[in-house]
């Protein structure tokens, strides 16, 4: 069976491709060689590959960056999805499609229990709006007969994620302090927000389960159902590193506190999936990754 992955060289793709290959999938990927915003290039890639399944990962994934460059978010997340879905309809109309969305599409929901798939979408950032618009495209194509799975993944973290995001930013700063590369000062945003943290390896396992044709098409949350504050994550990383540091609020990183936790009962009932990797293990692996990076950078700078 052939699976076509857009965004294969990104953070999630780096974990997804080995998992797919381990399960025996023949993987085709499109990143720098196929710009998803170019309709003709996408169509030609799908004409050649003729995949049985498609995982649409490629995205402008930073909420913060989307405010500065909203057009980029729209082009990559919305126009890119339009091009991919059009190519599938033309060249692989029987393919199962995982259209990877985001829990950010739910917006700042009231703290009234985990979010289910029937909760209305209230996207606020350009990133979330572009993802929600892509979901509407997916719903339209599903109504026309394509086998589209709309997947709303909650906050996933792990090795390989850029430090533009909050958890790896903490890990990098703490690693620099632990290795004596910077003063004992952490620059942070709002620590009171609550997120549903998942290990990227668990998220990848969910995507692999959703490729199974016996799973009904539809909308699925990928979530743990457990809320953890950003402050708790920071404290855990400091504890793991054995580091004490002064914490300073950076106005450029600060956003209003919100609460976003998901209910993945639908996914669990359909596939048997549940998260397996404890948050502490994820944070330990992330910290070790950044300490290695900091040491490598220091060696490179001194040579």
Image (tube, grey):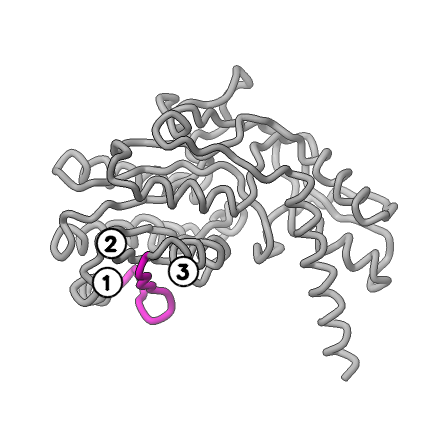
Q: Which mark is residue 8?
A: 3
According to the picture, the residue beneath numbered tag 2 turns out to be: 84
**Is residue 182 left or right of 280 when viewed as pictured?**
right
Vertical position of residue 46 compared to residue 209: above or below? below
- Secondary structure of the residue carrying tag 2 is helix
Q: Position of residue 261 (x, y in %)?
A: 53, 27
According to the picture, the residue beneath numbered tag 1 turns out to be: 42
Please state which of the two labelled residues, at mark 1 or mark 3, is closer to the viewer.
3
Q: Position of residue 90 (x, y in %)?
A: 11, 55
Q: Residue at x 23, y 45 (%)?
A: 96
Q: Which of the 4 quarters of the picture holds residue 7?
A: bottom left
Q: Label 2 vs label 3: CA separation?
A: 14 Å
Vertical position of residue 75 compared to residue 293: above or below? above
**Is residue 268 left or right of 174 when viewed as pictured?**
left
Q: Earlier in the sequence, mark 2 or mark 1?
A: 1
Bounds of the magenta segment: 25-38
């Amino acid at each position: 069976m052939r699976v076509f992955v857009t965004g294969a060289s990104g953070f999630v793709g780096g974990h997804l491709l080995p998992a797919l290959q381990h399960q025996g999938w023949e993987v085709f990927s499109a990143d720098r060689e196929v710009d998803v915003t170019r309709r003709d290039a996408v169509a030609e890639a799908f004409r050649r590959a003729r995949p049985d399944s498609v995982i649409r990962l490629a995205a402008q994934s930073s909420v913060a960056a989307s405010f500065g460059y909203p057009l980029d978010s729209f082009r990559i997340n919305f126009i890119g999805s339009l091009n991919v879905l059009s190519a599938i309809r033309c060249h692989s109309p029987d393919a199962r499609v995982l259209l990877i969305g985001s829990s950010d599409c739910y917006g700042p929901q009231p703290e009234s229990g985990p979010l289910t798939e029937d909760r209305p979408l209230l996207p606020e950032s350009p990133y979330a709006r572009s993802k929600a618009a892509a979901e509407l495209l997916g719903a339209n194509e599903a109504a026309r007969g394509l086998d589209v799975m709309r997947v709303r993944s909650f906050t996933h973290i792990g090795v390989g994620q850029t430090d533009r995001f909050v958890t790896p930013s903490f890990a990098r700063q703490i690693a620099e302090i632990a290795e004596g590369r910077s003063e004992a000062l952490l620059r942070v945003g709002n620590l009171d927000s609550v997120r549903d943290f998942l290990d990227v390896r668990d998220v990848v396992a969910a995507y692999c389960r959703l490729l199974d044709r016996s799973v009904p098409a539809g909308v699925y949350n990928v979530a743990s159902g457990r809320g953890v504050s950003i402050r708790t994550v920071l404290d855990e990383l400091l504890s793991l590193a054995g580091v004490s540091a002064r914490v300073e609020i950076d106005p450029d990183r600060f956003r209003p506190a919100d609460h976003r936790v998901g209910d993945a009962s639908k996914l669990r009932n359909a596939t048997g999936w549940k998260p397996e990797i404890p948050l502490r293990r994820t944070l330990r692996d992330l910290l070790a990754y950044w300490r290695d990076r900091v040491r490598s950078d220091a060696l490179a700078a001194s040579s």
